[in-house]
Amino acid sequence: MTRRILLAVLLLPAAAACTVGPDYQRPPVTTPDEWRQAAAVDASLANVPWWELFEDDQLRSLIKIALEENHDLKIAVERIEEARALYGYSRADLYPQIDASASAGALQAAPADDSTERYTLDVGLSWEVDLFGRIRRANEAEYANLVATEEARRAVAISLVSAVAQAYVELRDLDERLAIAQRTLESRREYVTLALDRFSGGVTPELDWRQAEAEMHRIEAIVHQLEAQVVQKENEISFLLGRSPGSVLRGRSVGDQVVPPAVPAGLPAGLLEQRPDIREAEQQLIATNALIGEAKAMLYPRIALTGSYGAASSDLDDLLDGSSEAWNIFAGLVQPIFNAGKNRRRVEVRESQARQAAYAYERAVLQALREVEDALVGLEKAAQQRAAQAERVVAEQTVLELSEVRYLGGVTDYLEVLDAQRSLFNAENDAVAAVSDHVTWLIRLYRALGGGWPVAGDADQPTAATASE
């Protein structure tokens, strides 16, 4: 009889090879053959490491610091550790649980009876035989969640790199605007002195002097505003770097930031493998798909093995004697019969969640395609705007020079010069903004293509072996 029981125990794991529920298949998502704004090429900007894309040594240094100290990235890394532990926790259900127990006490049935001592020492075993794959499907879901957290960490790294780069470009943009405003303020002060001298000499009316004075104070207010914005942008960068607010060292000016004339975007289908947010959405879909199998397995019988081996005696001295040996082994089966449709509703819930995850995956793909297209056209048009704004500055400078000659010659009043001054000031600021936008669109394209995950050990994908440690 004992041999039959042992044989049954050995054969049960072999019978536990089937799993119910659908196996995962990637949803068919249609992607265009090429981008609207660029020719389809195999090479992609996403394949360029961030340290090669950004040729500003100071910017590279800031990015490295952010990748080491940023708190959002640290949180993302800890979420991976949490998911790894949850996966190992789930995997433990595949194996038998063994517990040791010991007890000692006395029992008295009635007041007149003598008490009986009882001592036990045993090792117990319990194991759910995963006959229909409930535990394996749950493990599959937890592993997919683990990989999803790794992709989420990659997404945070990409966002962090682009956020630091963009904030740095914006800081250099503000630096350039402040320099223009300070230079313009000095020019306006000279004009106030000139207008005052001409008014005092009876050459021009007081109106010219007051207009020049008002314009000087307008530029002075802009200088103070830009000074505040520079400090606030430095504080933003310090926050991204995981530091207290402080000054930020500068490298290249915004105009010296390198933007390649031709930017390959690769093939649209490559986004499915490059973008971590798409891969994260797919892993979440894999997890919900596996949970369908777990829910379906709960419709079928659950088989559990329990047993124990030890010793029991009424005399502590005889507890370890061979005559006190005791053991048992049982196989139990539980088949759901009636629970008011609870288990079937569970399957329906999981199926709905899987459909939602599929829609979220498709939406992530479409969002990625849109972001790349937007960045491509933005980069192209920003280059054209940059060139046009540069030509505008040259033209406005000529206008101001001619207006000054006319004013000093008494041909026109100061209002013409004032208009020319304001137009040049606006043109210079717009030119700086165009340069900043051009560089910013390159950063956005880099992020949209899924490039730049530079965290140490990034190439290491979590595996079942490492996750179960």
Image: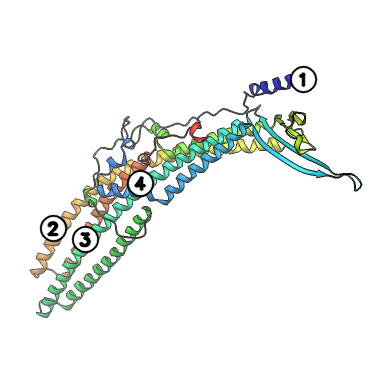
Label 2: element kind: helix
Q: Nearer the viewer, mark 3 or mark 4?
A: 4
Residue 60 placement (x, y as % from top left): 29, 46
Label 1: element kind: loop
Q: Nearer the viewer, mark 2 or mark 3?
A: 3
Q: Nearer the viewer, mark 2 or mark 4?
A: 4
The residue labelled by disc 4 is: 161
Residue 220 placement (x, y as % from top left): 24, 69
**Mark closer to the chain start, 1 or 3:** 1
Res. 398 mark = 2
Alpha carbon of mark 1 to alpha carbon of mark 2: how far? 108 Å
Say what amino acid the circle numbered 2 marks: Thr
Q: Nearer the viewer, mark 1 or mark 2?
A: 1
Q: Nearer the viewer, residue 115 or 17?
A: 115
Q: Residues within 10 Å of mark 2 (few under 14, many from 20)?
A: some
**Mark closer to the chain start, 2 or 4:** 4
